[in-house]
Amino acid sequence: MSSPTTTLSSHSPDPASVPRELCHREQVSPLVDTYGRLHTYLRVSVTDRCNLRCNYCLPPEGITPTAHEQILTFAEIIRLVRIFSALGVTKVRLTGGEPLVRKDIDKLVADLSGIRGISTIGLTTNGVLLENHVLPLKTAGLSQLNVSLDTLRPGKFAEITLRDDYRRVRNGIAAALAAGFVPLKVNVVVMNGVNDDEIPAFVELARRKPINVRFIEYMPFVNGPQQQGRFMPCSAVHRMITAKYRLTAIPVGEKEASVAREFRIPGFAGSIGFISPMSDHFCAKCNRLRLTAEGSIKSCLFYPAEAGLRDRMRAGATDAELVDIIRGVVEQKREGHPPLEMLTTLEKQTMIKTGG
């Protein structure tokens, strides 16, 4: 599926030898799928390891982490991001597992920030290690930061994560705000019967601080009796909040592909948002691709990876050959993910392995 406009040069098998001037995006046609969706956003998982054990992310029996040598090196990640940038990607988000457990993550951010065409570098973290990393990340060029936090109660935090790290996460959030990550996004996975009674308390986080609290629908990634009945649609969360607060919608630019519907509350320094991948999915405007920690491409969070790039790179593939693989995945991207009732019957993937 080679594109006639592709003019990327051959590449040395050593990924560290990639020149910064890999190519110019005007020489290469953009990544548009058969449904007309332009892909400008790449989520890169840098590890499948995590320092928490959240029961909606990991199965009860746990997982076997990928061997270190099977994880993409930083040089390989940088090479691939340069190629994706040449194909029109402008935003990169680092995920995991927990990306801050990867040694020298700030150095990776610094290298990515120097790639031509990449205008935004984000990172999603559970916040446990954030306090000590936030200043190096800011200095390295990180432009957006998301912190996942599903409860404001230390005891419940320990129940959900099987770790007693609540205070460390709150300290990390405070450090991120002090470092200038504004607005700071706090992601809350809403679970019926688990933390839905804390929704008003989460809204109050945005009263005096520039925090964008984002309520995210629970997604059925892990089997187990404790997962049954946890789904709560964003419409129900919205009704609960509007019963107490007056919400004003924040307009989204026509060309933006934001997955969140965001709102302001009069007098609040921050804002709130709703992300509804299950009840009101945003597949029609999806602009993202995912690169797993072991170097496979996923065009949809809910389907298995379609192609592997790691082994091809290590076997000496040229940039043009990698572009063909990437284009093939985009061209085969499905129109949308299955409905909720089907997702609950599919063979399960663990969130920690998908890259979030």
Image (tube, rainbow, N blue to C red):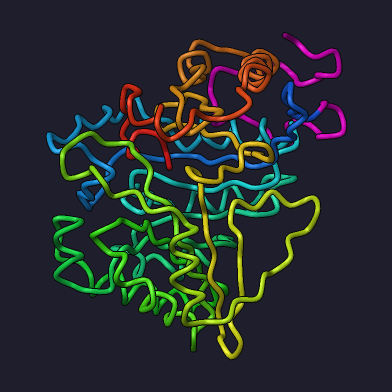
Decide whether the magenta segment is chiefly helix, strand or loop: loop
Relative to 319, is 123 on the left or the right?
left
Q: Quadrant of residue 79?
A: top right
The location of residue 322, given as percent across then percent down, is 63, 18
Q: Is residue 15 above or below residue 5?
A: below
- The residue positioned 73% from the left and 28% from the top of the image is 31
Q: Which residues are magenta?
A: 1-29
Relative to 15, is 131 on the left or the right?
left
Question: How many marks overall?
Answer: 0
In front of the other: 173 or 239: 239
- The residue positioned 17% from the left and 66% from the top of the image is 156
Quadrant where the image shows the N terminus: top right
Relative to 264, is 307 on the left or the right?
left
- The residue positioned 46% from the left and 15% from the top of the image is 311
Q: Quadrant of residue 196?
A: bottom left
Q: Is residue 25 magenta?
A: yes
In front of the other: 24 or 4: 4
The location of residue 329, given as percent across then percent down, is 61, 19
Quadrant where the image shows the C terminus: top left
